[in-house]
Amino acid sequence: MSHKPTYEELEHRVLELEQAESDFKRAEGALEDERRRLANFLWGTNVGTWEWNVQTGETLFNERWTEIIGYTLEELQPISIDTWLNFVHPDDLPISDEALQKHFRGETDIYSCEARMRHKDGNWVWVHDHGRVVSWTSDGKPLWMCGTHLDITVRKQTEAKLVESQAILEAAINQSPSGIVIADAPGVNIRMINPAAIDIRGGDSSQLTNIPLQEHMAKWQIYRLDGTSYPPEQLPLAMAVLHGELTRGEELIIRDHIGQEHIVITNAAPIRDSSGSIVAGIAVFHDITDRKLAEIERERLITELQEALANVRTLSGLLPICSSCRKVRDDEGYWNQIETYIRKHTEIDFSHGLCPECAEKLYGDQEWFKNRSDKGNK
């Protein structure tokens, strides 16, 4: 015979059911709270969500998933894995498939891929596709995956502009006729040098980079114009990195790998980040050896010309001369024979003789003069 529960047993069973119902409602409420928190979190992070049955192709997307590419959920119905395949860039699909297969094989804990998707307006938007397998079939195949789509278009555009700007900067540095050296803070380790700097210094660029401050002098052979060495910490590049000091137009000597000296004019400055901290320093220098040699030659010629001019005496202006004795008056008021005055003020010296007219006047009645004259006329 079956046992009939007593009243007490029935009452106890009812109480158990009521308690179970109460626990269920609390759990249901907690689950609803969790769902609400998750929805708020997803809304705050602005990510699209997806769920995918790997075996059947069934998919579930939230509204944000479709908003990223400019659609509503209703516009993309019916939803399936083909929805993703139809919108992803064909060049990025193999990358996504490879990342999925690695995750399915257990080589990665997370599936992660950056891919382009066609927007409703025809443009390509970038998404970070991120997820993992959450359940497996009994024979070890992936069953359900869950993940998110995050719009990273702005970041990708910024990265592209940064790459473009860096390419332009590198081209400008490499094509610059001036030598350029960049060193990191705080150790003043040389990060890069451009071809013009190598042309001046000579040698192998690998021997001139990634060197600490104390080796700068040994590797670069830098001197002041008077031939004295620089203490490493006083080099213009070091002063920029260590102290944030600017150097403008400092002339110094770089001795190249074969011992030839190059006079260069140097500018140096610190490179700061957005907070103002020094992260690196840059030195720009230009070989002015030919110009300096030309200046030296010019100064030599000017000096020689000045010395030559100092030895040249020139008479100019009015010169008072006596109409009777033909003496001239000098600047001090003294009267001198004209020969004496000219000899004193020029490089001219005199030899004395008689012109024919004066000779005739003085010696015309002399017989020897007449005989000389007769011989000269024959």
Image: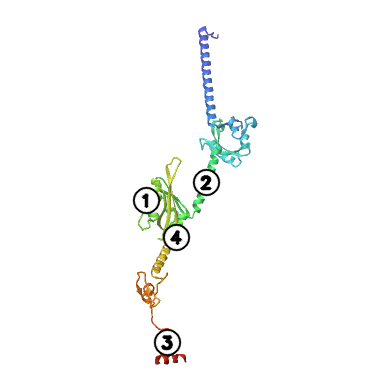
Q: Determine which residue is flagged by label 4.
A: 291
Cα gap from disc 3 to disc 2, whole angstroms: 99 Å
Q: Secondary structure at mark 1?
A: helix
Q: Is residue 139 visible?
A: no
Callout 1 environment at 10 Å: few (<14), some (14 to 19), or many (20+)?
few
Q: Residues within 10 Å of mark 3 (few under 14, many from 20)?
A: some
Does the CB distance between marks 2 and 4 fall below 8 Å? no
Question: Can you identify the residue that label 1 sits on?
Answer: 234
Mark number, residue 165? 2
For numbered disc 3, what is the local secondary structure?
helix
Say whether disc 2 or disc 4 marks the residue closer to the N-terminus: 2
**Colour scheme of the picture:** rainbow
Q: Nearer the viewer, residue 23 or 121?
A: 121
Residue 13 in the image: state x and y as whole percent: 52, 11
Q: Tell me the residue that label 3 is attached to.
A: 360
Left of 226 or right of it: where is 172?
right
Which circle's residue, 2 or 1, is located before the other in the chain? 2
Q: Nearer the viewer, mark 2 or mark 4?
A: 4
Residue occupying the point 40% across, 88% down = 363
Where residue 260 sits, quadrant-wise, is bottom left
State the count of labels: 4
